[in-house]
């Protein structure tokens, strides 16, 4: 998909050379030459291969050209020779941009991003129209929330509806499944029939995660615009605006440590800060927006926030959000661990199958020699073959760990596929966590591609008090897998409990089991409750030396942080996994209500695009001045694709299909997994050498398993 998109943009850029801007721009834009377009939009065999260089690196709008003869300057008709042929798929010509602004709100580990921009359909003659493609690249775990578009004659807005609310009205409804994610991080949407020469206003809102590292929160947003979207001539100044609001919820000092753009601090108070940037620019931003800040504290600190439900909330229970931050103190001891890797070896992985192959019959110390031998064994043994069976190797892994009460068992599961007995696997894991003690295995799951069940894997991690991550594109496997390893190997506080929950009349926790606090990641759980929290609550856990840890944290009522909004996506995802596991229709309905109320997509809701016609077309100037236009009641509904990850694809898994990575050598994808695992073992060595001075020689035991379940796919 990404390659096709890049090819379409490349063709569109070449096609845009037909546009004549006047004599004063002739040195920059050469006069068009007569040409005949073929029916195929593919480049000639002798042309150089097109990488994803034209994949959008900032919010963009493109004219979708199927008839090349309509490409012309809408203000200066050039009367060019007719061009024969059609483009299928359409060529994509990037539109000129007049204005861009971005408003960012950061709450704990979540950022809400609102981008507003103005684009000009500069490449289509005024007597014609074309569809336009909006492309929105998002940052870490981005999720689109809503889109609003204003064109000359029509307005468009996305809306969530419950699944099953579709009405069969052919005059008002278009069943075209438009709107999809490229590489799971770029949302694209088609706006139909936009007039040449018109102005398009686009406003998009999405949420994404902040990355936490060394007591700093890092935010990165694609904001690098290509030079060819700058208007060649315009009486309207090009404006670029940025506004960043940070509310950590902690009441402690917030300090900006680095930023990519010249932000100016405009507000500061305990726990909050605001920064802004506004300028008339000669060229648009050529670098992604990056912002990092830290919350001052050297030790573990936390809090508990309370919030009343909104007036329209179907759930009248109060909300709470409990968080723990690891702090900045990096001189710490480490838990002793035993580690098992479960690697998918099915045909789609080229790296789980129905058989089990073991590096050794027992856990071994993670010495340099053992790691070297294990790495060599992997390269010789990991040959893609067979189908998928996860239950047997997972049971074998559970039998190998948890026998020493002073070691934390870590099980890593890496797969790209779906198996039939996933619910049985989750229920089996629940029984293995009956005691919930230190020796209960922590499960860390990693999914690759769109064929694996991205609700089974998080549920398995929740049951195992671990964490889940995924990579829907092969290029992201190395970094994401390495990050999961880094986090998993740095537990700081185990068996975390919150005493006051038991004193409440009732409560619901998301996730239901509180995971460990890791030194590289904040711990955040939320929920609903009935009853009363005291002013101080006690947090308990186990330290790395197995001593008890107790801390009092403050309970604060908050009105400037909307917990409903901040925790919306997390809670919808967790409840969706629970609904899948229990096959519970009531939970599905609950998820749908929560999705509609909080405005976040879910598996049980649909996104529609509502089109409204305006009474009269407005001038270019009036649109730029945001002049209000009265609208008719005439509406049209376009159903869009569901951007959620789905419940896996069992047939594709059984067929060992590698979705999304056909153009990448599968052995290279497998190499990424093996290299990431080897790097992880290297961390064991470093920790082992350091622990020889402070603990016994049985500091680490590690074990490699190879089993069956598909892993390397891209979306």
Image (cartoon, helix red, strand yellow):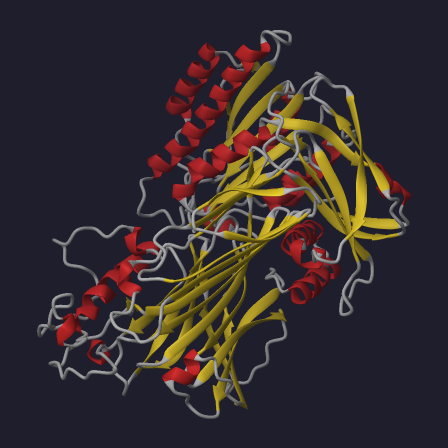
- In the visual, does 253 lie left or right of 21? right
- Splitting the image into 4 quarters, where does residue 511 fall? top right
Q: Nearer the viewer, residue 705 or 279?
A: 279
Counting the numbered discs, the total is 0
Expressed as whole percent of the image width and height from the top left, the position of residue 398 reads 65, 26
Q: Nearer the viewer, residue 584 or 682?
A: 682
| Residue 42 visible in the picture | yes
- Splitting the image into 4 quarters, where does residue 517 fall? top right
Q: Which quadrant of the rendered structure holds the N terminus?
A: bottom left
- In the visual, does 94 lie left or right of 48? right
| Residue 421 visible in the picture | no
Q: Who's the residue at 50% across and 29% down the image?
A: 355
- In the visual, does 489 lie left or right of 53? right
- In the visual, does 327 lie left or right of 556? left
Q: Where 506 sits versus 342, above or below? A: below
Q: Who's the residue at 53% across and 63% down the image?
A: 205
Expressed as whole percent of the image width and height from the top left, the position of residue 198 reads 35, 81
Residue occupying the far left of the picture: 34
Q: Where 2 sits versus 395, above or below? A: below
Q: Who's the residue at 64% across and 40% down the image?
A: 460
Q: Nearer the viewer, residue 135 or 667?
A: 135
Expressed as whole percent of the image width and height from the top left, the position of residue 26 reads 12, 70
């Amino acid at each position: 998909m990404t390659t096709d998109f890049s090819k379409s943009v490349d063709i569109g850029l070449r096609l845009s050379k037909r546009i004549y801007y006047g004599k004063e721009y002739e040195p920059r834009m050469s006069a068009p030459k007569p040409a005949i377009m073929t029916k195929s939009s593919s480049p000639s065999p002798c042309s150089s291969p097109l990488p994803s260089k034209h994949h959008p690196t900032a919010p963009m709008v493109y004219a979708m050209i199927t008839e090349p003869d309509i490409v012309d300057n809408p203000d200066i008709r050039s009367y060019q020779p007719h061009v024969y042929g059609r483009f299928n798929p359409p060529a994509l010509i990037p539109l000129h941009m007049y204005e861009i602004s971005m408003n960012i709100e950061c709450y704990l580990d979540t950022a809400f991003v609102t981008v507003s921009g103005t684009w000009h359909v500069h490449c289509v003659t005024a007597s014609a129209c074309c569809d336009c493609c909006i492309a929105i690249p998002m940052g870490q775990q981005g999720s689109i929330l809503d889109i609003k578009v204003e064109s000359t004659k029509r307005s468009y807005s996305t809306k969530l509806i419950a699944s099953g609310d579709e009405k069969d009205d052919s005059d008002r409804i278009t069943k075209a499944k438009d709107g999809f994610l490229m590489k799971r991080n770029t949302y694209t949407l088609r706006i139909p029939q936009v007039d040449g020469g018109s102005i398009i206003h686009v406003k998009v809102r999405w949420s994404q995660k902040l990355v936490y590292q060394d007591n700093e929160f890092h935010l990165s947003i694609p904001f690098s615009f290509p030079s060819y979207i700058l208007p060649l001539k315009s009486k309207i100044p090009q404006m670029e605006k940025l506004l960043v609001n940070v509310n950590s919820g902690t009441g402690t000092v917030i300090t900006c440590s680095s930023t990519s753009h010249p932000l100016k601090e405009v507000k500061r108070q305990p726990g909050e800060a605001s920064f802004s940037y506004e300028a008339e620019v000669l060229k648009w931003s050529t670098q992604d927006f990056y912002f990092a800040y830290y919350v001052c504290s050297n030790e573990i600190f936390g809090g508990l926030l309370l919030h009343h439900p909104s007036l329209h909330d179907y759930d009248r229970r109060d909300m709470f959000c409990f968080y723990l931050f690891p702090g900045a103190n990096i001189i710490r001891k480490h838990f002793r661990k035993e580690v098992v890797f479960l690697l998918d070896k099915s045909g789609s992985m080229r790296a789980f199958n129905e058989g089990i192959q073991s590096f050794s019959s027992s856990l071994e110390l993670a010495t340099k020699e053992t790691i070297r031998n294990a790495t060599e064994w992997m390269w010789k043994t990991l040959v893609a073959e067979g189908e998928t069976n996860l239950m047997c190797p997972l049971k074998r892994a559970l039998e190998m760990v948890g026998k020493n009460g002073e070691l934390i068992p870590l099980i890593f599961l890496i797969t790209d596929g779906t198996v039939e007995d996933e619910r049985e696997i989750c229920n089996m894991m629940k029984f293995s966590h009956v005691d919930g003690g230190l020796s209960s295995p922590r499960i860390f799951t990693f999914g690759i591609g769109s064929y694996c069940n991205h609700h089974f894997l998080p549920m398995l991690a929740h049951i195992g008090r671990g964490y889940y991550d995924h990579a829907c594109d092969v290029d992201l496997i190395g970094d994401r897998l390495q990050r999961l390893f880094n986090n998993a190997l740095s537990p700081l506080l185990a068996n975390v409990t919150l005493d006051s929950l038991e004193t409440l009349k009732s409560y619901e926790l998301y996730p239901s089991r509180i995971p460990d606090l890791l030194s590289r990641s904040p711990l955040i759980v939320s929920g609903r409750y009935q009853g009363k929290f005291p002013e101080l609550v006690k947090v308990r856990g186990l330290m790395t030396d197995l001593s008890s840890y107790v801390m009092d944290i403050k309970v604060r009522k908050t009105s400037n942080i909307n917990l409903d909004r901040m925790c919306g996506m997390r809670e919808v995802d967790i409840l969706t996994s629970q609904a899948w596991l229990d096959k519970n229709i009531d939970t599905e309905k609950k998820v749908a209500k929560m999705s509609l109320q909080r405005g976040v997509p879910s598996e049980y809701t649909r996104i529609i695009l509502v089109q409204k016609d305006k009474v009269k077309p407005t001038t270019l100037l009036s649109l730029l001045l945001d002049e209000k236009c009265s609208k008719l009641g005439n509406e049209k509904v376009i159903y869009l694709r569901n951007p959620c990850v789905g419940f896996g694809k069992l047939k594709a898994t059984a067929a060992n299909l590698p979705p999304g990575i056909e153009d990448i050598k599968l052995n290279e994808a497998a190499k990424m997994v093996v290299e990431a695992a080897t790097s992880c073992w290297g961390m064991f060595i470093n920790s082992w050498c350091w622990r020889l001075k402070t603990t016994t020689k049985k500091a680490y035991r590690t074990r490699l398993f190879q089993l069956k379940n598909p892993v390397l796919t891209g979306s």
